[in-house]
Image (cartoon, rainbow, N blue to C red):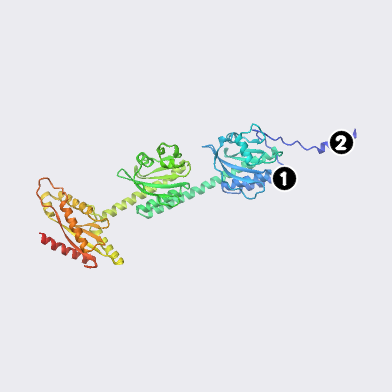
Amino acid sequence: MVAQEEKNKKAEENTEPAKPKNFKGEVVVPPVKSRPGNSVALLDAIAAISSPLDTTRVAQVAARQIVLFSDADSCTISRWDQDDNSITLWAEHCRGNDQSLPVAHLPYPASDYPHTEKVLKTATPVWLYIKDPGLHEGERILMKSMDANALLMLPLISQEKTIGLIEVFETGADREFSAEVVANIQVLAEHAGISLERARLLEEAKRHAAELEIIRQASIKLTASLDLSHVFNAILYSALQLSPDALDAHIFTVQDNKLEFGASLWADGRRGPSYKTVREGGLTASVAKSGQAIAIERVETHPLYLNSSWIKEGWKGSIIGIPLKIGEEVVGVMNIAYRSRQEFNEDRLRLLGLLSDQAAIAIHNARLHDFVKHQAVTDPLTGVANRRAFNDQLEEEIQRSRRYNHRFSLLILDLDGFKAVNDTFGHLIGDRTLQMVAECLQRNVRSTDFLARYGGDEFALILPETDREQAKSLAEKINKAIAECHMPWPEGENLSRIRASSGIASFPYDAETADYLITLADTELYRKKQKNA
């Protein structure tokens, strides 16, 4: 009897405690108290996961710690995009590999994997076994690719919201994680979610700070120049800085209800081609007409791009058109195209709105500057250069010709019989006559020639790379064109046609200074006028 009792007692001492029951299928693991040794290891693992300050590194460390703590074969951590129900690999770690594996997988739809989708949508852990005849074929292929006999899937949760998926793979056919180990993996997953949220907030704060700095720098650049081309470049450069995944950005200006191409810039720094026409009913025209931003997240399905050549070439990204407005006036449109699908949330639209507001002001100021500058050097009646602009251009041409040892000629014209026009028809008809003469002159000179109204009924022409004989031929051509020009005189009035007397001086043969060139040309002009009188 005593022997039997001792035998029973010894058997009890040799009996191992019952192992926590492994869960299979959709089973929530109840909390299990860890052993002291495991508690220290668990705290070390939690500390390691909590250390990194960027999301990718947190995911990498979490995958590594889960493998180390559970002695699993591998672990992957993925992001879940709830909007399109897609999964993107975040981090992957295999046992025995101290380096985190590079992540190169493309997003895939969660709906292709039923158990995966259920874990994400119900936040419930799941065990899968390769030998299970009811295993979905897609998940069987996934496990085979990892050489896994068992797979534990857990939701990655942050702020009570599922943000991703943790997958723990085991290649051993006989090995299964105990409920205690699984519970501790869940603890690590919870801390990974907390650390990821903290890292996300930190990254978001850094991103906002960087974006505000871009806006600040854009403001400095946009106010540093009143040259419209420089303004365009500053706007596009800042727009691309705020849009890391952008393909290119374009600006179109709106003036007098007309849309015109301004500038373009590709993400790689190339200057894009100019667009001579704007597609009627397209994005740019629609934004200009409505004065409202249009954000298109899926260009391949949007009505504005149904027949676009870009779509035919396979582009499946996003694009946004933003009005550049001063008050309610649209002064331009900025388009930003993206390689892949974008989410235009409120924060993003607000940021681009800040840039567009500054861009609109800069364009308006540059236009105003150009207008004032143009007015300062333009004759208000005829629209050609005025006496001030002529004097500046003459000095520049002298300096250029001296530098390169070139020649040029100065031609001064005076209209014969113009006084009779004013005396007969009045000054309004006289002004219109001067305008017609200026238009006639512009049609008959080269693009390199400089035409100015010298004063009254006198015009001056600076003719680069032109000698006296060539200038004389041009004067004859101009005189003939003016004589044949249809003047705005009342029908039936008999008035002699206007003609022009001219004086020529050539650099450097006749003179080498502006004053002397003008004096010589004037002298010849008035000698001819007296002869024609």
Answer whether residue 381 is visible to the viewer in this image. no
Asked if 375 appears above or below 410 in the picture, the reply is: above
* In-image side of 167 versus 343 (left or right): right
Mark 1, secondary structure of its residue: helix
Q: CA distance from mark 1 to mark 2?
A: 32 Å
Mark 2, secondary structure of its residue: helix
Task: Find residue 350 and report its horizontal and vertical position in percent.
Answer: 44, 43
Q: Which residue is mark 1?
A: 37
The image shows a total of numbered marks equal to 2
Quadrant in the rendering for residue 113: top right
Image quarter of the N terminus: top right
Image quarter of the C terminus: bottom left
Task: Find residue 316 and report its horizontal and vertical position in percent.
Answer: 46, 41
Task: Find residue 97 and report its horizontal and vertical position in percent.
Answer: 65, 49
* In-image side of 241 versus 137 (left or right): left
Nearer to us of marks 1 and 2 is 2
What residue appears at the point 50 percent right and 48 percent down from the top-left corner?
207
Asked if 416 appears above or below 167 in the picture, the reply is: below
Asked if 307 appears above or below 488 in the picture, the reply is: above
Q: What amino acid is found at the position of numbered circle 2 in the picture?
A: Lys
Disc on res. 7: 2
Asked if 393 appears above or below 296 in the picture, the reply is: below
Q: Residues within 10 Å of mark 1 (few under 14, many from 20)?
A: few
